[in-house]
Amino acid sequence: MQLSVQRIVRRFGPVAALGGVDLEVAEGEFLTILGPSGSGKTTLLKAIAGFEIPDEGTVLLGGEDVTLAPPRQRDVGMVFQNYALFPHLTVAQNVAFPLEMRRRPRAEVARRVEDVLRLVELQSFGGRLPRQLSGGQQQRVALARAVVFGPRLLLLDEPFGALDRKLRESLQLEVRRLQRSLRLTTLFITHDQEEALIMSDRIAVMDKGRIQQIGLPGDLYARPATRFVADFLGESNLLEGTASAASASIPGFGEVPLAAPQPAGPVTLLLRPEALRLGGEVEALPCRARGTVVETVFLGLSAKLRLRLQDGPEVLARVPLRPSAPPPAAEGEVVTVGFSPEDVHVVPRA
Ligand SMILES: Nc1ncnc2c1ncn2[C@@H]1O[C@H](COP(=O)(O)OP(=O)(O)OP(=O)(O)O)[C@@H](O)[C@H]1O
C-alpha cells in the first residue's frame, strides 16, 4: 500500500531527530533509508510504525491518516536487528502470534503459518524453539512473522546487522525475492551503502534529520546532489578546483573540461575511483596527472591504489585485475593516471 510521510518533525529537547521529512513510497516499492548513525532513520521508522508520535506532520497509509493511530491498528509488519522472537514459543507459535492477536480461525492460522514457513524455507522447523536456530534462521522466522498477516507495509530496521557477510548476502536476496513475490511496500533501514545499492528500487539518503536526496541507486551514485551524498554513497575523490565557464582548474590535473558551464569560482568535482585509469590507455585520455603510489590494497577482482599526485591531493584509483595480468603498480612507484571528462560530476554547492 502507498505510504506518504509529510513534513514530519520530531524533537528531543534541543535535538530535532526529524527536521521536516517528506517521503512517498509507491505501492510494491522497496525504498531504503540510508544514513549514518544518529541521522534519524529509526525515529522515522517509529513514527511510521506508531511507536513515536511526531510533533508535526502527517503519516498517510493508503491515503488514510494514521499519524495518531496505535501501532496495532496500522497493520504494519516489522523486523529489527535483534530478532525479537518470543524465546519460549516455537517457530510455528511465533509466526502464528500476529494471526492469533487478530483472532483468525484456527484452520486459517495453521494454513498461513505453513505457507509462510515454506516461503522462507523453514517448513520443517515449526516445532523448534528460537534458541535451537542459527541467527540467519531466526531472522527468517522474524520475517515470516512480519508478513504472515498480509501487512499493508513492511518495515525493516537493520535486519541483517548481526549476521556475517555471507549470510547477509543470501538473506538480502531472499528478502528481495519475498518482497517482490508478495508485492509488499517496504521501507528498509541501513547504514550500509553497499546493501542499499544492492537491494533498493530507490534510496533516500538521510543526514541530520533530513532527507538529503532520493532517487534510483544508479542516479544517486553517478549524480549526487550534495557533497555528503557523494561521500557517503560509495568511495569518492572530491577534487577542489576553480571553475571558469566550460573548464575547471584542478591541482594535479590542470584544466579539466566540464560538460555543463559553471559559474566562475570554487567548484567540487566528483571522480569515482573506478573512473581513474592507469597503464597504457592513459596516454589517450585528455586529463592526466603523475603520482606516487602510496598504498595498494588487493581486493580480489580489483585493486585499490592510493596515490599522491604531484602538485596535488591524494586520490583513490580502483583498477580491475585479471588473474594472468601483473599487478598494476607497486608502492613507491611513480605512475600516470588519467580520466575522461565525461566521467566527472560537478557536485552542486550547498
Ligand atoms: N528517545 C529519545 N530521547 C532523546 N533523544 C533521542 C531519542 N531517540 C532518538 N534520539 C536522538 O535523535 C537522533 C536520531 O536518532 P535515531 O535513532 O533516529 O538515529 P539512527 O539514524 O536510527 O541511528 P542508528 O543508525 O545509530 O540507529 C539522535 O541524535 C538520537 O540521539
Image (spheres, grey):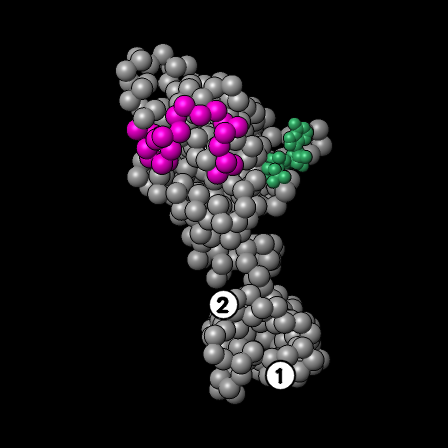
Mark 2 = which residue? 301
Nearer the observer: mark 1 or 2; the answer is 2
For the point 51% across and 21% down, the residue is: 86
Mark 1 = which residue? 335
Establish whether ligand 1 lies closer than 8 Å to the Cβ of label 2.
no
- Residue 159's spot in the image, x, y percent? 51, 38
- Residue 68's spot in the image, x, y percent? 50, 20
- Residue 254's spot in the image, x, y percent? 62, 81
- Residue 50's spot in the image, x, y percent? 51, 24
Position of residue 161 in the picture relative to residue 111 (left or right): right
Circle 1: residue type: Val
For the point 36% across and 36% down, the residue is: 121
Q: Determine if residue 130 is in view.
A: yes
The stretch in magenta equals 115-136
Establish whether ligand 1 lies closer than 8 Å to the Cβ of label 1.
no
Q: Determine if residue 28 is in view.
A: no
When asked about the image quadrant of residue 153, the answer is top left
Q: Quadrant of the C terminus?
A: bottom right
For the point 28% across and 22% down, the residue is: 111
Estimate how packed mark 2 is, as few (under 14), some (14 to 19) or many (20 or more) residues with alpha carbons within 10 Å. few
When asked about the image quadrant of residue 264, the answer is bottom right
Position of residue 184 in the picture relative to residue 130 (left or right): left
Cα–Cα span, label 1 and label 2: 21 Å
Give the mark nearest the N terminus, 1 or 2: 2
Q: Is residue 101 magenta?
A: no
Circle 2: residue type: Leu
* Closest to the observer, 169 or 90: 90
Position of residue 74 in the picture relative to residue 229 (left or right): left
Ligand 1 in which quarter? top right
Estimate how packed mark 1 is, as few (under 14), some (14 to 19) or many (20 or more) residues with alpha carbons within 10 Å. some
Q: Is residue 248 above or below residue 25?
A: below
